[in-house]
Image (tube, rainbow, N blue to C red):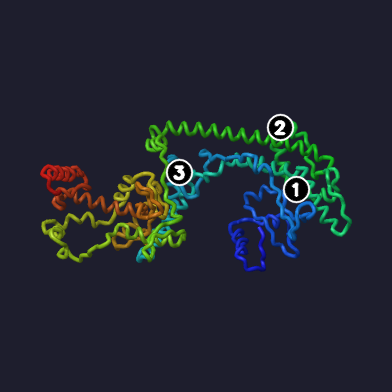
Amino acid sequence: MNTNQNSSNPIDNIIPLLKQFQFKDVVKHFNITPPITHIVNRIDYIFTSRNLLSHTYHAFTHTINEHQFFYTDHKLVGCLLNKFFFTTKPIKLIYNKLNDTPSPDKINYRDINVNTWKEYEQNSNIAFDILLPILSSQEDLDRAWSDFVDIINDLKSSLPKKNSPQNPYSAPLKLRQAHNKVFKLQRLLQTFNAKRILHVCNILRDKSTINTPVQQMYQKVNDINNPHWNTYWGSNWIPYYRFLLNIKKSLHNIPFISSFTIPKHITLKNFAPTKSFLKQLLQTLRFNYNMIKNNITKKNIEYFVEARNNNLTENQSKMLNSILNRQPRKIMLSKLQYIDENNELTFTTDPHKIESLTRQHFQSYASPLHCNYYTSPDDLPSPWNEVYLPRQDINDNIWHPLLQPLSMDDLKLVIHDAAKYKAPGPSKITYEDIKHLSQLGHSYLLHIYNYCFNNNYIPSAWKLAYIFPIPKPQDWNSQLSNTRPITLLETPRKLYVSILSKRLNYILANNPNVTTHNNRAGILGQSCLEPLLEIQHSIEIANKLNVPF
């Protein structure tokens, strides 16, 4: 690439663009002071990606002999590449499910044993052995809730963490370490290449003889002078010396490794035997790498065979997904398609814009386009105005149990009935965290509940929730209209609502005159069967008489 820094040519914008995309000036990478390429300026470059940069030997400039090639006032810019980059098949590191790393914020609730929960309960008894907070305002309530969350999170720090999948392109640590040893030793052997040594030493010779008569170039390794030889190996051998000592220490039981003395400096005398030793060592490291890889593959096969057998009885949905080759459908909000102010379909990748559009969409997701607001039953259209009129035949005393302060029995009942392994809300508190608290922990939570009940307050944090977009049957195609939301509320909030729902359910179940006979599907002892049968009967009659339903 040829650019002129003093011109206004649009090509001048290429260099900043290449640097923006992490491309590197390879000549500058290998030379502290890059040489000029044209008269007094440096206007010729070679840029390369970081992946290719690790496979380069050296970069240089060279004057072109006009009698042998052609005339130009530019110098040649060259770069030496490792031939193995083009001929060697890269090693593919396979992701191993058995060696996942623990996630810092996900608890493995399914594998927690009884003893661990007993220890958790004992710790909670100590943590909540404090005076109940005095609640007299919204600020006091928010502070009490925040303290409750902090205590729970401290208690959860001792629970076993759930293994989370690694990067799908990564591999187990042991396999990566073996691969790195092979790769690093390959790089070291490249420095023993005779052509590379001669090329670099000739450049060093040219730099040191600028003001002296022209000398003949080095043709053989044995012809290289000691100053140039020591300069070359000073930068290429010393960084690997400690690396080779560590390998020798870990493989001391192999005779040819333990018997070889690794030299501190490379000389013309030990050059050949050291190169021969490194080649033999590379074969050993490759053998070790393949052995580790085969063992991991074998363990993976055994793991997945056992998992398949277990899924037959424990997780049939996962088994069916595997048999039918179903892939999980995910939504990545990295780009979004929307209608702009000009009523045109537009894409955006701006995170702030995506966040704003997503929030706006789901805030109005369940709201109709046109809605009417009514202030009293008289404003409702017929026949709903009669349905919502106050009932005079209901005894007001039946609501008395609903208005009583919440008791410990109420809390214990809803905790006992709570589902297991459900996703938590923003505070990360799960039903299991609350269920295994001590009596003092439950008393602290009940104290918060009763203040909310008596004063019509709730903690401000309860108004927050996680919303996750889930794909509909069709592809989501970067359109929020092709998704539906799932909302994760705070579990203590859901327990609080459940206490009131159970009380209300009990009242309605024991007072059947409050609701109509076909409006009791969710009440204790009732079902959806009767309303469904009535709807089915009405549909059949409409079809038989050929009249609208």
Question: What amino acid does circle 2 point to?
Answer: Asn
Q: Are marks 1 and 2 in contact (CB under 8 Å)?
A: no
Q: Are marks 3 and 2 in contact (CB under 8 Å)?
A: no
Question: Splitting the image into 4 quarters, where does residue 111 fall?
Answer: top left
Q: Is residue 418 left or right of residue 381?
A: right
Q: Give the residue at x 60% y 56%.
A: 22
Q: Give the residue at x 51% y 45%.
A: 102
Q: Is residue 546 left or right of residue 41?
A: left
Give the percent coordinates (x, y) of residue 103.
50, 47
Closer to the eye: label 1 or 3: 1
Q: Nearer the viewer, residue 203 or 533?
A: 203
Q: Give the residue at x 11% y 59%.
A: 392
Tell me: residue 19, above or below residue 242.
below
Disc 1 packing (10 Å; few <14; some 14–19; many ≥20): some
| Disc 1/disc 2 C-alpha distance (Å) | 28 Å
Q: Residue under circle 3?
A: 108
Tell me: residue 459, above or below residue 266.
below
Question: What amino acid does circle 3 point to?
Answer: Asn
Question: Splitting the image into 4 quarters, where does residue 182 fall?
Answer: top right
Name the N-terminal-most of marks 1 and 2. 1
Name the N-terminal-most of marks 3 and 2. 3
Q: Nearer the viewer, residue 435 or 15?
A: 15
Q: Secondary structure at mark 3?
A: loop
Q: Residue under circle 2?
A: 253
Q: Nearer the viewer, residue 538 or 291?
A: 538
| Disc 1/disc 3 C-alpha distance (Å) | 48 Å
Q: Nearer the viewer, residue 193 or 314?
A: 193
Tell me: residue 83, above or below residue 462.
above
Give the percent coordinates (x, y) of residue 397.
16, 56
Q: Does residue 400 show up?
A: yes
Q: Residue under circle 1?
A: 236
Question: What amino acid does circle 1 point to?
Answer: Asn
